Amino acid sequence: MAMRISIQPGVQGNATKVAKSGSSIRRKAWLAVFAACGLFWTVVALMVWQIWS
């Protein structure tokens, strides 16, 4: 017995938007991680510089 599933045109467009927004959120999350890491090491370097000078 064969079963046919039809998808409405509007449903497929919403799935694409969800996938794009998910990757956008993931990209922003990684950017925040790298920015926080860079800020942390900058603060550490400035503290070491201040202590040793």
Image: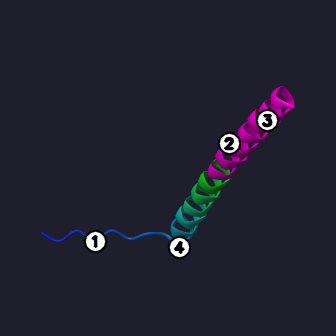
Q: Which sits earlier in the primary sequence, circle 2 or circle 1?
A: 1
Q: Secondary structure at mark 1?
A: loop
- Discs 3, 2 touching: Cβ within 8 Å: no
* Circle nearer the viewer, 3 or 2: 3
Disc 2 to disc 1, how far (Cα)?
A: 51 Å
Q: Secondary structure at mark 2?
A: helix
Name the amino acid, label 4.
Pro
- Asked if 8 appears above or below 43 in the picture, the reply is below
- Discs 4, 2 touching: Cβ within 8 Å: no
Disc 4 to disc 2, how far (Cα)?
A: 43 Å
Q: Which image quadrant for residue 4?
A: bottom left
Disc 3 to disc 2, how far (Cα)?
A: 10 Å
Q: Which mark is residue 37?
A: 2
The 10 Å Cα crowd at callout 1, few under 14, some 14 to 19, many 20 or more, is few
Name the amino acid, label 2.
Cys
Q: Secondary structure at mark 4?
A: helix
Side of 44 relative to 22 (left or right)? right
Q: Secondary structure at mark 3?
A: helix
Q: Which residues are magenta?
A: 30-53
